[in-house]
């Protein structure tokens, strides 16, 4: 069982939002994505998808896209991107998924998971204060997202602790079921006793200039995160991406077009 990741699927199976208008690199991207996905990912694997999943403006408009993702092999962990306008409250989304028989997807928001000896945490992220487009309202959202990242990381640690205490059960068993609600994450595929790898999935880049710190980088370092995955950047924006290790944290861009629509294995 392995963990894979890819961001920015930008599916539009039921709305008129063709991505090839953004360049030839997006031609036939859905077919390419499905081909790569099915060639390497099995039902026992887990795929992290940090945001911009569907162009749908409502859950009904996003239904075909979500069904496409659900039909692909593997368990999926989804987090929200800036274009996921269909995403309501977690309960509404979870109820919608359940009502349509979609069982392979879980949501990451203010919670964390422990999978295959790996802590999984994350949030959407936002514009960094250093961004010249950042306004006072953006500062408030940025601080909120930093707080959500910390809560998610703390929850993933609780999930690991619950698994180490013998609370791990079947795949997708929540800690509320396994440990009397001690934590909102999941303790499936647990490998208690092993030093856990810590992976964070963000939609917005948490860093551009490796010489500058911010709330996201400080939180990642505080929790000893090993790998931070992010998307959001497309086309020429790929040139702005920071990839590499800074203060012990590895940063990696996983936008779908950057990966040539081929999920990476962690």
Image (cartoon, rainbow, N blue to C red):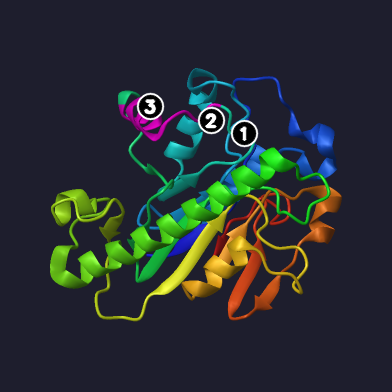
Most extreme residue toward the front is 136
Q: In the rendering, which numbered label is found on residue 11?
A: 1
Up-down relation of residue 195 to residue 243 (above or below): below
Kindly report the distance in space between the C-alpha atoms of the residues bearing marks 1 and 3.
20 Å
Q: Earlier in the sequence, mark 3 or mark 2?
A: 2
- Label 2, residues with CA under 10 Å away: few <14, some 14-19, many ≥20: many
Q: Hey, which quadrant is residue 165 in on the image?
A: bottom left
Q: Nearer the viewer, residue 259 or 188?
A: 188
Q: Magenta segment: does it hold 226?
A: no
Give the percent coordinates (x, y) of residue 239.
84, 60
Up-down relation of residue 125 to residue 199 (above or below): above
Q: Which residue is mark 2?
A: 65
- Would you say the residues marked 2 and 1 are in contact, meaning their CB atoms lie under 8 Å apart? yes
SS for callout 3: helix
Q: From this viewpoint, is residue 175 visible?
A: yes
Give the percent coordinates (x, y) of residue 177.
16, 49
Give the position of the N terminus as an image quadrant: bottom left
Residue at image coords 49%, 23%: 59
Give the percent coordinates (x, y) of residue 209.
78, 67
Which segment did they paint magenta? Answer: 86-98
- Would you say the residues marked 3 and 2 are in contact, meaning their CB atoms lie under 8 Å apart? no
Q: Earlier in the sequence, mark 2 or mark 1?
A: 1
Kindly report the distance in space between the C-alpha atoms of the residues bearing marks 2 and 1.
6 Å
Q: Which residue is mark 3?
A: 92
SS for callout 2: helix
Q: Earlier in the sequence, mark 1 or mark 3?
A: 1
| Count of numbered marks | 3
- Would you say the residues marked 1 and 3 are in contact, meaning their CB atoms lie under 8 Å apart? no
């Amino acid at each position: 069982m392995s963990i894979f990741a890819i961001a920015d699927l930008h599916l539009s199976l039921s709305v008129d939002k063709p991505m090839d208008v953004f360049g030839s690199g997006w031609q036939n991207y859905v077919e390419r994505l499905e081909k790569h996905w099915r060639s390497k990912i099995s039902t026992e694997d887990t795929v992290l998808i940090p945001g911009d999943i569907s162009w749908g403006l409502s859950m009904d408009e996003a239904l075909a896209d979500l069904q496409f993702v659900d039909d692909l092999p593997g368990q999926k962990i989804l987090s929200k991107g800036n274009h996921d306008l269909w995403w309501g409250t977690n309960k509404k989304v979870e109820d919608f998924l359940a009502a349509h028989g979609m069982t392979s997807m879980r949501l990451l928001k203010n919670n964390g998971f422990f999978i295959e000896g790996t802590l999984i945490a994350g949030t959407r992220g936002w514009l960094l204060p250093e961004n010249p487009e950042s306004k006072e309202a953006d500062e408030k959202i940025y601080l909120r997202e930093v707080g959500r990242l910390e809560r998610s990381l703390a929850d993933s640690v609780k999930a690991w602790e619950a698994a180490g205490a013998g609370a791990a059960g079947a795949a997708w068993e929540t800690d509320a079921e396994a440990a009397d609600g001690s934590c909102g994450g999941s303790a499936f595929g647990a490998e208690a006793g092993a030093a856990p790898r810590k992976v964070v999935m963000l939609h917005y880049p948490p860093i551009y200039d490796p010489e500058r710190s911010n709330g996201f980088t400080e939180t990642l370092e505080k929790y000893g995160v090993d790998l931070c995955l992010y998307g959001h950047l497309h086309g020429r924006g790929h040139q702005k991406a920071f990839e590499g290790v800074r203060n012990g944290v590895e940063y990696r861009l996983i936008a779908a077009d950057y990966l040539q629509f081929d999920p990476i294995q962690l």
